[in-house]
Image: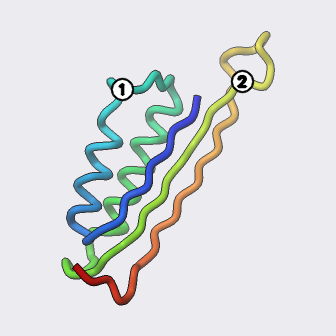
Amino acid sequence: MSWSFTVIGRVRAVASDVANKITNDEVSVIAEPERQLRRDVGDLIAKTLAPYPENVAVHVEASGSQWTPDLKAPAEAINQINLKIEVLYGFVE
């Protein structure tokens, strides 16, 4: 399974939207441990954005995937995670 999201805007609005996306497991069929890893990414994003000044604009991209390389060993899984948090200078509204 895989998941991804991109959020752009002022830091507090982005943090709130990311939290909503991370906790919205009902719309996706994500198995463990991928679901917990996705929550961990959300926690990392929240901790990273927490000290930012409110007027800063950011671009957050996150994605991940989990697959089983050997169907005879379904308990074994490979996870891949990508995360990018970028400050957007010169952002105007």
- Horizontal arrangement in the rendering, residue 13 relative to residue 57 (left or right): left
Residue 8 placement (x, y as % from top left) = 36, 65
Q: Residue furthest top?
A: 72
The crowd level at tag 2 (other Cα within 10 Å; few <14, some 14-19, many 20+) is some
In the picture of the structure, the residue carrying the numbered disc 1 is 27
Q: Earlier in the sequence, mark 2 or mark 1?
A: 1
Question: Amino acid type of disc 1?
Answer: Val
What residue appears at the point 31 percent right and 34 percent down from the top-left corner? 24
Q: How many marks?
A: 2
Check the image and tell me how it is coloured: rainbow
Q: Quadrant of residue 69?
A: top right
Residue 73 placement (x, y as % from top left) = 75, 14
Label 1 element class: helix
Q: Is residue 17 above or below residue 2?
A: below
Q: Quadrant of residue 51?
A: bottom left
What residue appears at the point 58 percent right and 54 percent down from the top-left corner? 82
The residues bearing labels 2 and 1 have C-alpha atoms spaced at a distance of: 22 Å
Residue 6 placement (x, y as % from top left) = 43, 55
Cβ–Cβ under 8 Å for marks 2 and 1: no
Question: Amino acid type of disc 2?
Answer: Thr
In the picture of the structure, the residue carrying the numbered disc 2 is 68
Residue 48 placement (x, y as % from top left) = 37, 68
